[in-house]
Image: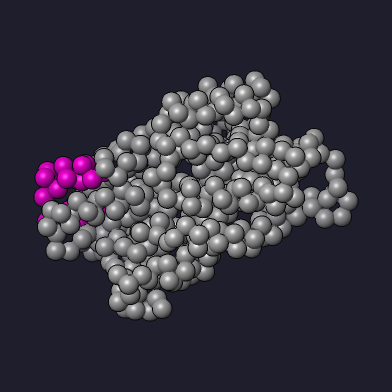
Amino acid sequence: MKTQPGRTTVRSLATALAATTSALSLTACGVIGGDNASAVSKKGSDITVGLLLPDRDTTRFEKFDRPLIEQRIASLTHGKGKVRYANAGGSVATQGKQFEQMIAAKVDVVLVDAVDAKAIASGVRKAKDAGIPVIAYDRLAEGPIDAYISHDNELVGEVQGRSIVEALGSKAATSKIVMMNGSPADPNTARFKKGALGELENHVIIAKSYDTEEWLPSVAKANMRKAIQSVGLANIAAVYSANDGMAGAVIDAVKEAGAGKIPPVTGQDADLAAVQRIVSGEQYMTVYKSFMLEATNAAEMAVAKVQGRDIAFDALTRDTVDSPTQKGIPSMLVPVVALTKDNIKATVIKDGVYTIKDICTPKYEADCAAIDLT
């Protein structure tokens, strides 16, 4: 997808979601409309939201999350609110410095997607000492955070694991699979793995399992080569890949090893390249997480927290989760769905993430026609 069309899609989607998220999350507790709409705030619309994202290797962060958050904050603040943005590029040290810069700039609230959940705790504490609330975005950060928004990450792993078992069918019990887990520094990795193992253990044979430093596709590819050498290409019946970037690397390794047919490979994030691999049959599935709802609701949280709309904030955080350093964190967990070639139209196309034209480029035209994606 080219940059400009992608941004157009995000703008139109954000407009549609803005009304939906506001209506569902805020009117549910009666905090929007009537006299409540003019309730006194701690601060008005002239606010600055600090946004710290972890890397650029995960396509969604720059292409969707950042612009959606920026657009929703602008909408909620009548164009007066600003976003101070920084991307860590996968570096823990860089993100620590960026956090300190946010504090020094006296932003009103920080949305942080941590590169390393434990390492970010010192920055969270410094922000707290400075009176700046912190909302953990997508990954659960340690330290005294005010709220957390993500997806049900254990369910993500369950969906991935269940998809493998279903793909293998009656051969599952005697099938050897390889697990390509995410970064050990990311707390979501443990949740993905727990959910996946709940579906895979006692149903398949886990021949090899790897953690992937910083979610790097290059690391996943190197580990897949090791697995092929150890287990044997013909003996690998499926690969659990925790996300789409690694799935692409795994598939490349399998193809380079000379596979005539690629075994079922899972993924997560519904990256465009992954959706195209699913269309062509190279990737079995991906987990589609509505990062649109996650991003827009994160913006709602940030603005509500700064403006002191406690009832609105509570309406957005009806769940609670525990971190290693904090219990009962107010949270929102956004649902997920398994995306296969059978429901592309009902998911990413229906939601405006991609168009058929985006997916069905000349390379994939025949594959698209074969599954009636036209």
Q: Which residues are magenta?
A: 220-241
User: Is residue 80 among the parts visible in the rendering?
Assistant: yes
Left or right of 168 on screen, residue 67: right
Give above or below for 5 relative to 127: below
Q: How many marks?
A: 0
Q: Is residue 301 magenta?
A: no
Residue 7 image offset from top left, x and y in percent: 53, 58
Residue 30 image offset from top left, x and y in percent: 79, 52
Give the image quarter of residue 366: bottom left
Residue at position x 39%, y 53% in the image = 268
Residue 16 image offset from top left, x and y in percent: 64, 63
Residue at position x 40%, y 76% in the image = 373
In the rendered image, which quarter contains the N terminus? bottom left
Give above or below for 100 relative to 235: above
Left or right of 300 on screen, residue 93: left
User: Is residue 316 among the parts visible in the rendering?
Assistant: no
Residue at position x 38%, y 57% in the image = 286
Q: In this view of the protein, which residue sits in the foreground, 155 or 139?
A: 139
Left or right of 95 on screen, residue 231: left
Q: In this view of the protein, which residue sits in the foreground, 161 or 366?
A: 366
Residue at position x 51%, y 43% in the image = 138
Q: In this view of the protein, which residue sits in the foreground, 216 or 178?
A: 216
Left or right of 195 on screen, residue 258: left
Q: Is residue 235 magenta?
A: yes
Q: In this view of the protein, which residue sits in the foreground, 317 or 344?
A: 344
Residue 236 image offset from top left, x and y in percent: 17, 53
Give above or below for 206 relative to 326: below
